[in-house]
Image: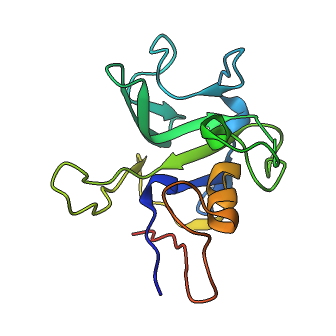
Amino acid sequence: MKKTFLLIGMLFMLLIANAQNNSVFSFDELFLPDTGFWNGSDTSNYVNFFGNQWLTFENNYNPDYFSWEGFSFSNWTDTITEGYYNQWSTFAGQAASDSIFGIAFIPTDWMSGTYNTIPVNVNFTNSVLINSIKLTNSTYAARIIRDGSDFNTPYGQDDYFFVRII
């Protein structure tokens, strides 16, 4: 049985390497607000994109709903607390590089009733050969998969949660 709970479609992108020039993108080079996470609500630092000279991540913040989609970043490592705010924590308990990691929230087409996923983009300025990407679930996603929530039951033996990179 396949369960689709797309609201928890958050995965942490921790490290991306450009094998052509041996560059490594680390979120640790980004400015992190005092909250410990950035989701686009403060557009003074980044507007719709963040990253570096060869790699940018798309972010869409909606001030009407205080919500975001696409990518954000954080340094939260709480693996225990449940609830909405743990969407900024890594269930792995640490970042792959130093202390800051990226977070992806994949939106769905809820307005049409299909709940199809809407792709979010990572943009490269040149063609690159990706050497590695490290991913893990957010604490929020991992706890819902394991424990269930008010909206779904825990995942079972035949359920799955996947990432598709195109």
Question: 160 and 82: which one is in front?
Answer: 82
| Above or below for 133 versus 44 | below
Q: Residue at x 43, y 70 (%)?
A: 4
Horizontal and vertical percent for residue 126?
41, 52
Horizontal and vertical percent for residue 33?
67, 17
Say whether residue 158 is left or right of residue 115. right
Q: Residue at x 37, y 51 (%)?
A: 120
Q: Residue furthest front?
A: 150
Q: Residue furthest left?
A: 112
Q: Is residue 135 visible?
A: no
Horizontal and vertical percent for residue 110?
25, 52
Q: Residue at x 58, y 45 (%)?
A: 103
Say which quadrant the C terminus sits in.
Answer: bottom left
Q: Tag count in the figure?
A: 0
Say whether residue 139 is left or right of residue 127. right
Say whether residue 141 is left or right of residue 127. right
Q: Is residue 10 visible?
A: yes
Please name the colour scheme applied to the rendered image.
Answer: rainbow
| Above or below for 9 versus 42 | below
Q: Residue at x 76, y 36 (%)?
A: 76
Say whether residue 100 is left or right of residue 130. right
Question: Image quarter for residue 87?
Answer: top right
| Above or below for 119 versus 1 | above
Horizontal and vertical percent for residue 107?
36, 50
Question: 77 and 23: which one is in front?
Answer: 77
Question: Image quarter for residue 61?
Answer: top left
Question: 162 and 49: which one is in front?
Answer: 162
